[in-house]
Amino acid sequence: MSPEPATRRRSRGVAEFAFAIPGDPDQRTGGYLYDRRLAAELPRQGWQVRPVRLPDGFPFPDAAELAATDRLLADLPDDMPVMVDGLAFGAMPEVAARHAARLRLVALVHHPLGYETGLSPQVAERLVESERAALGHARHVVVTSTTTAQTLATAFSVAEARLAVALPGTDPLPAAVGSGDAAPALLAVGSVLPRKDFPALVDALASLGDLPWRLVIAGSLTRDPFEADRLRATIRRHGLSERVTLAGEVAADELRALLHRSDLFVSSSRYEGFGMALAEAAAAGLPVVAVAGGAVADWMHPDAAVLVPPDRPDELALALSSVLAGPDRRHRLRTAALTARARLPDWAACAAAVAAALDRVARA
């Protein structure tokens, strides 16, 4: 007997979809956190999750990993909705093509693979072409910001009717109390990768040596050892080892404690599909100085943050100076942040948007 169609499974209230994620799903990055929270919330929206763990090598899989991915998808029932995280989907166009007619494929795109900083032009172009081809085989595409939706529509030929925006949720947090120190405590969060550009942040702060401040960078130092070494070298070159702390990857409760004791959140990221670390800072009512790369300016309240364009190191230094040297300005930013945090999206709304996309795919 052939597997029951998705539409019939849905009508009986037992809707099921497969959620395919590459590598360890417990990794502490924004994308994996989004995937975990989505998987936890979707059953409340009427969709049961069948987890599928894809190989570790994405977005640069070898032939064996692509073959294993092909087998994993082949084991799924005909007509099943299958949402594949974009870290894998954009790098598997041939596999997607083989299963597009049999499965109801949905791509979940946090940001385009080829837009990662640090890639050679040839690799970036290859990833863009691969992702464009793969997305052509998706019945629907879920994205985490309106900026990514616009990018996929204009640069990746994804019809707007196939796009759904599901903004990441943010858990409520107690308002940060700050450090209470004369030197403001700055916090930056994210894996140490070229896209996060933490050396640029250290360069900007080095020009403000006459102002009191100290910085903690919380994020993995092992995902890109070369970039981690570049960051350490930048800190040593400026003689800032006593003022900049590399905390490495921290657990959720430790991160919340850092947010609670900080006075200012800073981000030098060149591109964000949304900016979940920034949203968590906003949830804690922290004032923000950030590079507005990618989608950050879409949702960050302008009165709660000082935003500067990417590749403007002088403007980043000036923004930091204006906030560090002006406690009144920090107070105004904090007041606005405490008001704006009530408007941050929650995970239930995120899951509802994805569930609506799955509903459309199941009915089609």
Image: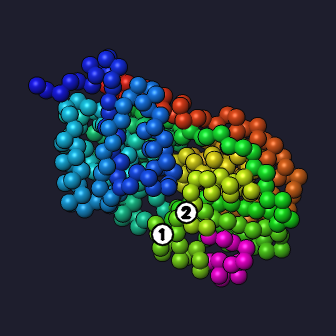
Q: Position of residue 60 (x, y in %)?
A: 32, 61
Quarter of the image containing the N terminus?
top left
| Residue 245 included in the magenta stretch of the image | yes
Q: Position of residue 160 (x, y in %)?
A: 42, 32
Residue 251 shows which numbered tag? none
Quarter of the image containing the C terminus?
top left
Label 1 with label 2: CB-CB less than 8 Å: yes
Q: Give the amino acid at mark 2.
A: Glu
Q: Quadrant of residue 192?
A: bottom right
* SS under mark 2: loop
Where does label 1 land, which residue? 222
Q: Residue at x 46, y 66 (%)?
A: 223
Where does label 2 land, which residue? 249
User: Considering only vertical position in the picture, is 72 above or below 185?
Assistant: above
Q: In the orientation shown, which residue stands out farthest toward the left? A: 1
User: Which numbered disc flags the more N-terminal residue, 1 or 2?
Assistant: 1
Which color scheme did the rendering employ for the protein?
rainbow
Q: Residue at x 56, y 57 (%)?
A: 251
Between label 1 and label 2, give the one nearer the viewer: 2
Q: Give the amino acid at mark 1.
A: Thr
Quick one: 104 or 176, which is closer to the camera? 176
Give the total of numbered labels: 2
Instruction: Identify the magenta region.
Output: 234-246
Q: Is residue 29 visible?
A: yes
